[in-house]
Image (cartoon, grey):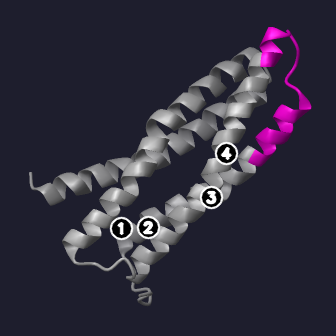
Amino acid sequence: MTFYLLLKTVHVIGAAVLLGTGAGIAFFLLVAYLRGEPREVAGVAQTVVLADFLFTATAIVLQPITGVWLAWLSGYSLGDGWIAASILLYVVTGAFWLPVVWMQMRMRDLAIRAVKSNSSLPYEYTRLFRWWFAFGFPAFAAILIIFWLMIARPAIPYWD
């Protein structure tokens, strides 16, 4: 296997991890929330926070490194339209993901507190969950568009 192919494989796996982990986290936390059991929500939220740090954060760090390296090895400029658009969308995704991480940690703590006090999830949990859910849509849409840009490489005007 050539270095380029190895780098591309790591990049594609990282993209799959971002998409898959994001979709999985959203699904499992949504289902737990809809069931309304603080113990279940607390358990899922703990796992979600862990998964985000282990998988999502790792992929977030590796994607720009492998992406820039691949562009350089392939002779592309970061100003090429589809690459520049991907970078911009990646920044947009990060702008939504960073607050979501804080929300998830806070939601986890609120759910754990509800379990310990044998009470329902507080309104603050519901409010944070709604924001968390809303932030997921633009971030997920941006990731899907990045996937399309990487596959299609459409002719978008040069941005250099």
* CA distance separating discs 3 and 4: 9 Å
Residue wearing tag 3: 95
| SS state under label 1 | helix
- Give the image location of residue 25, x and y in percent: 58, 37
Q: Main secondary structure of the magenta part?
A: helix
- Residue 123, image quadrant: top right
For the point 85% across and 24% down, the residue is 121
* CA distance separating discs 3 and 1: 24 Å
For the point 36% across and 67% down, the residue is 151
Side (left or right) of 114 relative to 15: right
Q: Residues within 10 Å of mark 4 (few under 14, many from 20)?
A: many
| SS state under label 4 | helix
Residue wearing tag 2: 148
Residue wearing tag 1: 151
Q: Amino acid at mark 1?
A: Ile
The answer to whether the residues at label 1 and label 2 have Cβ atoms under 8 Å apart is yes
Position of residue 97 relative to residue 53, above or below, is below
Choose the circle earlier in sequence order: 4 or 2: 4
Choose the circle earlier in sequence order: 3 or 1: 3
Side (left or right) of 35 relative to 137: right
* CA distance separating discs 4 and 2: 24 Å
> Range of the magenta residues?
113-131
Of the residues tagged 4 and 1, which is closer to the observer? 4
- Residue 96, image quadrant: bottom right
- Give the image location of residue 67, x and y in percent: 33, 62
